[in-house]
Image: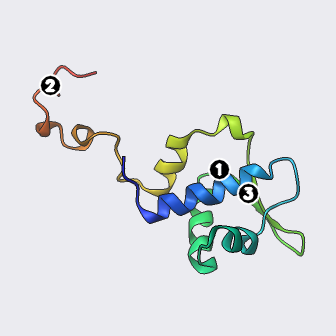
Amino acid sequence: MKVNTRVRYGLRAILRIAEGHGGPPVSISTISEEQGISGKYLEQVVGTLRRADLIRSRKGVKGGYTLTRDPADINLWEIINALDKHTSLVDCVLEPEVCERSDACL
């Protein structure tokens, strides 16, 4: 499955935040430097993840981002779906006419 840049960067960001789970919040600048992602673009991506309730932010000098729940309780599809509403695992989900079996498919 191919994913767009927004999803790739979001996955890299949330994985970095998950690495620090249980510790202090991870800042945008830390993620940006370590992952080689533009800070401005990263702010947009993590904003989307925050609105999807996957991460939360804390303001201030020791601020940054943490997961809203245990990393084991967050699945890949949640992250992908939060960042790209047009992603489907297979073409026939959005376009049933591309598959001759779509009428009988679960």
What kind of element bears circle 2? loop
- Upstream in the sequence, badge 3 or badge 2? 3
Q: Residue at x 35, y 40 (%)?
A: 89
Q: Looking at the figure, which quarter contains the C terminus?
A: top left
Q: What is the distance, in whole Å, between disc 3 and disc 1 at their CAs?
A: 7 Å
Q: Is residue 26 left or right of residue 39?
A: right
How dense is the environment of label 1, judged by Cα within 10 Å: few (below 14), some, or many (20 and up)? some
**Figure quadrant of residue 27:** bottom right
Give the Cα distance between marks 1 and 2. 35 Å
Residue displayed at 62% across by 64% down: 46
Residue 24 drawn at (x, y percent): 88, 58
The label on residue 82 is: none
Secondary structure, mark 1, is loop
Report the amino acid beneath label 2.
Answer: Arg
Can you identify the residue that label 1 sits on?
54
Q: Is label 3 in contact with label 2 (beta carbons under 8 Å)? A: no
User: In the rendered image, is residue 100 in sight?
Assistant: yes
Under mark 1, the amino acid is Leu
Q: Position of residue 28 (x, y in %)?
A: 72, 71
Give the CA separation, mark 3 to mark 2: 42 Å
Disc 3 secondary structure class: strand
Residue bearing mark 2:
101
Residue on which disc 3 sits: 56
Of circles 3 and 2, which is in front?
2
Q: Residue sitting at 57 percent across and 71 percent down? A: 44
Q: Is residue 70 left or right of residue 6?
A: right
Q: Earlier in the sequence, mark 1 or mark 2?
A: 1
When the figure is inspected, residue 42 is found, relative to residue 25, above or below; the finding is below
Q: Position of residue 87 (x, y in %)?
A: 36, 50
Q: Which of these two is toward me, 55 or 76?
A: 76
Say few, some or many: other residues with alpha carbon within 10 Å of mark 2 (under 14 / 14 to 19 / 20 or more): few
Query: Tag 3: Cα neighbours inside 10 Å, few (<14), some, or many (≥20)?
Result: some
